[in-house]
Image: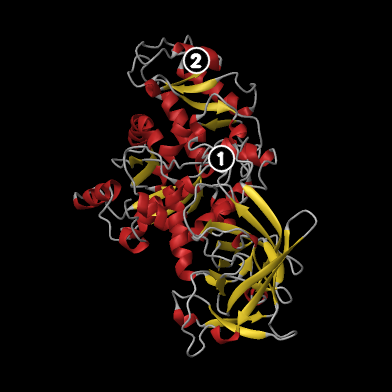
């Protein structure tokens, strides 16, 4: 098995191909002032782990070359957009550790300029209003091997096109009645050049401009021009936009000619993030939320940044994961275990150790003094000895994990069984002497005797046993709800299963709620929403926002070891 690089090792990697291109542009004098990038999300949903990869590239490249990165919302479709998404996106970017300073922009900031540019293209005979239906336009575009046919409205006069275009925005026509198309080449080998639509009618209030506009620019028309207006040097996109790049350059050249400028942003593309057992479609993620199949956008099973945050992931772990997988020109599938490795490595170094019993069964230490309470010292974090210890109460009655006892155990079972010894972590060696079962045959109580000369840390205690179990006091432990999260889908690539309803691929065991967990009382002093802990021998957990003074709720971030759940 190939060893996974540590978070420190991945920081020493060589430049990726985009960084190499930026450095070459700087050396060749193509960057006049400074590197200037942008992150352009659509405010129509919450950001997911794939967007985190783009954020790290856009903001990271600007930081690396002492440049600037804008945050620009691509708000050109008011039907799907909402200020809720705007606020959530800004929160996620800040949480990841990036900031846009005073460079917060919206595509809607440029609606007036884009309109003027569209009118200029009409005046130059390079755009026209088409009254055909969407189906007719699609049919006339032809195929990759067959040229398209011209629209019957392609040769309208400039005056008629201007009149119709302006009336489109006045609201005189219904949605779908007409569009504005760029007049390029219906025989082009690039399908995007076959007179693309650049404006369409949308009669829906915009979250920033209200009812001012009834005609809105298409992405391909707004994106590159917004880059131009902001002085972006490097427009970094994912690979699906590679085929759009010639059109991006075409419009940028047309605008530069109108503006009498030689400047043009450079678009570059990298591979998007595809991850096993994960769905990245915002449309389908929205469907999960709306149909109540998950708690919300921040459900810990969701691949959204806010979902990962609620689950207990840290910005450092996400950035380490992205650095680990890198940026290439080839799409592929990343194993989700790499993401889990990154958070496991981070929390192993930084999470406080806590004793918690998820599925408790009572153990009575028959020879331990009735009413006695001993305070045992437990390390807060063996990775950071300077963080010291805390104390956990030891009493006659304790809880251990039900799975840590087996009545008829094999020789390779090194946990608790009858007539064998185990150590209770931080306390004593005990020997099981018997059990009590309920009417259903379930083990109700386990009886043990302890050896008072085997207290952990006691001078002269040399006796060793193979098994060590975590435990909590029945009297002093705190009740808690624990939510065990597993992978949301049952198949490795749910996006590839196009013949079935993706909802049928949901893992019915993706969330398992345990209502009767018990945790050592120290947790009451340190549990804050978002705080991360290692439950000894179980995994890493995060305090959920559903916690209250009366009930603590924990989400499992990740198990201690890789699993296929």
- Residue located 62% across and 66% down the image: 418
Q: CA distance from mark 2 to mark 1?
A: 38 Å
- Residue located 40% across and 14% down the image: 143
Residue 244 in view of the camera: yes
- Position in image of residue 408 (x %, y %): 60, 58
In the picture, the disc for residue 88 is none
Q: Compared with residue 549, is residue 290 higher up or lower down, i.e. above or below?
A: above
Tag 2 secondary structure: helix
Indicate which label's residue lies in the foreground, 2 or 1. 1
- Residue located 67% across and 48% down the image: 295
Q: Compared with residue 281, is residue 160 higher up or lower down, i.e. above or below?
A: above
- Position in image of residue 150 (x %, y %): 42, 11
Q: Are marks 2 and 1 in contact (CB under 8 Å)?
A: no
Number of labelled discs? 2
Depth check: give the residue in front, 57 or 218. Answer: 57
Q: Quadrant of residue 263?
A: top left
Depth check: give the residue in front, 549 or 381. Answer: 381
Q: Compared with residue 53, is residue 142 higher up or lower down, i.e. above or below?
A: above
Residue furthest to the right = 439
Residue under label 1, please give it.
Answer: 489
Residue furthest to the left = 28
- Position in image of residue 175 (x %, y %): 62, 23
Q: Compared with residue 447, is residue 441 higher up or lower down, i.e. above or below?
A: above
Q: Is residue 447 left or right of residue 158?
A: right
Depth check: give the residue in front, 330 or 90. Answer: 330
In the picture, the disc for residue 137 is 2
Depth check: give the residue in front, 445 or 62. Answer: 445
Q: Quadrant of residue 364?
A: bottom right
- Residue located 38% across and 31% down the image: 244
């Amino acid at each position: 098995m190939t060893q996974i690089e540590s978070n420190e090792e991945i920081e020493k990697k060589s430049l990726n191909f985009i960084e190499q291109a930026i450095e070459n542009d700087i050396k060749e004098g193509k960057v006049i002032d400074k590197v200037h990038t942008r992150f352009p999300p659509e405010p129509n949903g919450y950001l997911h782990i794939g967007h985190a990869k783009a954020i790290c590239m856009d903001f990271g490249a600007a930081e690396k070359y002492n440049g600037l990165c804008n945050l620009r919302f691509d708000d050109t479709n008011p039907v799907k957009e909402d200020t809720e998404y705007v606020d959530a996106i800004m929160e996620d970017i800040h949480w990841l550790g990036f900031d846009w300073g005073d460079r917060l922009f919206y595509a809607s900031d440029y609606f007036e300029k884009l309109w003027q540019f569209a009118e200029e293209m009409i005046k130059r005979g390079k755009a026209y209003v088409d009254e055909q239906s969407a189906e007719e336009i699609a049919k006339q575009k032809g195929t990759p091997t067959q040229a398209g046919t011209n629209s019957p409205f392609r040769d309208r006069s400039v005056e008629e096109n201007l009149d119709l275009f302006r009336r489109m925005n006045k609201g005189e026509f219904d949605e779908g009645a007409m569009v504005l198309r760029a007049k390029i080449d219906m025989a082009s080998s690039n399908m995007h050049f076959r007179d693309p639509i650049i404006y369409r009618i949308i009669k829906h209030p915009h979250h920033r401009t209200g009812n001012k506009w009834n005609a809105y620019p298409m992405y391909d028309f707004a994106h590159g021009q917004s880059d131009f207006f902001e002085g972006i040097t490097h427009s970094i996109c994912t690979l699906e936009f590679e085929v759009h790049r010639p059109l991006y350059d075409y419009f940028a050249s047309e605008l530069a000619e109108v503006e009498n400028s030689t400047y043009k942003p450079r678009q570059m593309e990298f591979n998007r993030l595809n991850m096993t057992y994960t769905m990245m479609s915002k449309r389908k993620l929205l469907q999960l939320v709306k149909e109540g199949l998950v708690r919300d956008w921040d459900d810990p099973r969701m691949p959204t940044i806010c979902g990962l945050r609620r689950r207990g992931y840290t910005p450092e772990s996400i950035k380490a994961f992205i650095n680990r997988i890198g940026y290439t020109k080839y799409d592929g599938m990343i194993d989700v275990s790499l993401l889990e490795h990154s958070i496991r490595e981070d929390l192993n170094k930084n999470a406080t150790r806590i004793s918690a019993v998820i599925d408790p069964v009572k153990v009575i230490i028959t020879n331990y003094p009735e009413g006695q309470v001993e305070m045992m010292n437990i390390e807060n974090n063996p990775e950071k000895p300077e963080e010291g210890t805390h104390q956990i109460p030891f009493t006659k009655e304790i809880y251990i994990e039900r799975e840590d006892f087996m009545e008829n155990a094999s020789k390779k079972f090194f946990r608790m069984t009858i007539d064998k010894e185990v150590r209770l972590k931080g306390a004593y060696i005990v020997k099981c002497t018997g059990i009590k079962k309920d009417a259903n045959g379930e083990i109700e109580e386990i009886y043990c005797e302890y050896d008072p000369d085997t207290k952990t840390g006691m001078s002269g205690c040399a006796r060793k046993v193979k098994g060590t179990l975590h435990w909590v006091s029945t009297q002093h432990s705190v009740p808690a709800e624990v939510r065990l999260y597993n992978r949301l889908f049952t198949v490795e690539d749910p996006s590839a299963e196009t013949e079935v309803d993706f909802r049928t691929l949901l893992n019915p065991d993706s969330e398992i709620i345990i209502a009767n967990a018990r945790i050592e009382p120290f947790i009451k002093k340190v549990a804050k929403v978002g705080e991360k802990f290692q439950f000894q021998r179980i995994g890493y957990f995060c305090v959920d926002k559903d916690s209250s003074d009366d009930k603590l709720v924990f989400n499992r971030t990740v198990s201690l070891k890789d699993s296929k759940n």
